[in-house]
Image (tube, rainbow, N blue to C red):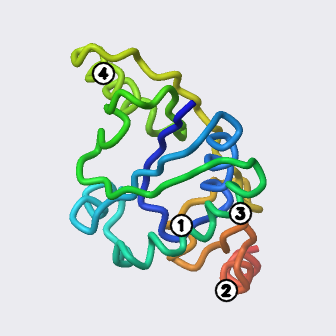
């Protein structure tokens, strides 16, 4: 089965890795990586996002590890619109995080309108950081946590001062 997922992936973290693991368990994976133009529009907060080519290189290195482990193929394609590649007929499943389930529903509506079967939607729960909040790229960029959800020394110091 061909499996789709999409995102900005800047930087890649353990929450993303949970998505990748689910996708590779299901089949060969195609990742839609947001274009430089789309990436800022998909962010909940205004923050710097690295250029597409840099994000793609890091993402491909990460995906190669999963592809080897699961003996699967993968490709990374540029995503220029939010519903992206998943509306194409070759996919059978879509892997999403909880906050993107509305987008998955819209993708399936488009697929049905085009005469394609709806995708099986796999919702992967968030991965929690050490402090019980979710791991997110924004929190990593802000310096609150690292890619594995560990509190950074700066954050630990601020938390200790409050106690």
Q: Does 9 appear above or below 31?
A: below
From the image, state whether disc 1 or disc 2 is nearer to you: 1
Please tell me which residue is depicted at 26% across the width and 23% down the height of the picture. 110
Residue holding disc 4 = 111
Q: Which mark is residue 154?
A: 2
Spatial CA span between label 1 and label 2: 27 Å
Count neighbours of disc 3 (C-alpha within 10 A) and say few if under 14, some if 14 to 19, many if 20 or more.
few
In-front residue for pair 73/41: 73
Spatial CA span between label 3 and label 2: 31 Å
The image shows residue 163 at horizontal and vertical percentages of: 76, 73
Please tell me which residue is depicted at 52% across the width and 29% down the height of the picture. 93
Of the numbered discs 4 and 2, the one sitting upstream in the chain is 4
Q: Is residue 34 left or right of residue 163?
A: left
Of the numbered discs 4 and 1, the one sitting upstream in the chain is 1
Of the numbered discs 3 and 2, the one sitting upstream in the chain is 3
The image shows residue 11 at horizontal and vertical percentages of: 53, 71
Spatial CA span between label 1 and label 3: 10 Å
Please tell me which residue is depicted at 77% across the width and 62% down the height of the picture. 130
Spatial CA span between label 4 and label 3: 31 Å
Residue holding disc 1 = 59
Asked which secondary structure carries label 4, the reply is: helix
Please tell me which residue is depicted at 48% across the width and 40% down the height of the picture. 4
Of the numbered discs 1 and 2, the one sitting upstream in the chain is 1
- The N terminus lies in quadrant: top right
Residue holding disc 3 = 65
Q: Quadrant of residue 146?
A: bottom right
Of the numbered discs 4 and 3, the one sitting upstream in the chain is 3
From the image, state whether disc 3 or disc 2 is nearer to you: 3
Asked which secondary structure carries label 3, the reply is: helix
């Amino acid at each position: 089965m061909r499996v789709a997922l999409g995102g900005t992936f800047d930087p890649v973290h353990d929450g993303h890795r949970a998505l990748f693991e689910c996708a590779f368990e299901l089949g060969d994976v195609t990742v839609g990586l947001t274009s430089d133009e789309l990436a800022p529009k998909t962010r909940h907060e205004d923050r710097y996002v690295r250029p597409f080519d840099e994000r793609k290189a890091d993402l491909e290195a990460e995906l190669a590890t999963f592809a080897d482990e699961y003996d699967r193929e993968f490709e990374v394609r540029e995503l220029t619109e939010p519903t992206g590649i998943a509306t194409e007929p070759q996919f059978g499943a879509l892997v999403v995080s909880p906050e993107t389930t509305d987008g998955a529903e819209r993708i399936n509506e488009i697929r049905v309108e085009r005469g394609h079967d709806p995708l099986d939607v796999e919702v992967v729960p968030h991965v929690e950081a050490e402090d019980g909040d979710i791991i997110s790229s924004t929190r990593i960029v802000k310096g609150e946590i690292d890619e594995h959800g560990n509190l950074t020394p700066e954050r630990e110091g601020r938390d200790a001062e409050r106690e």
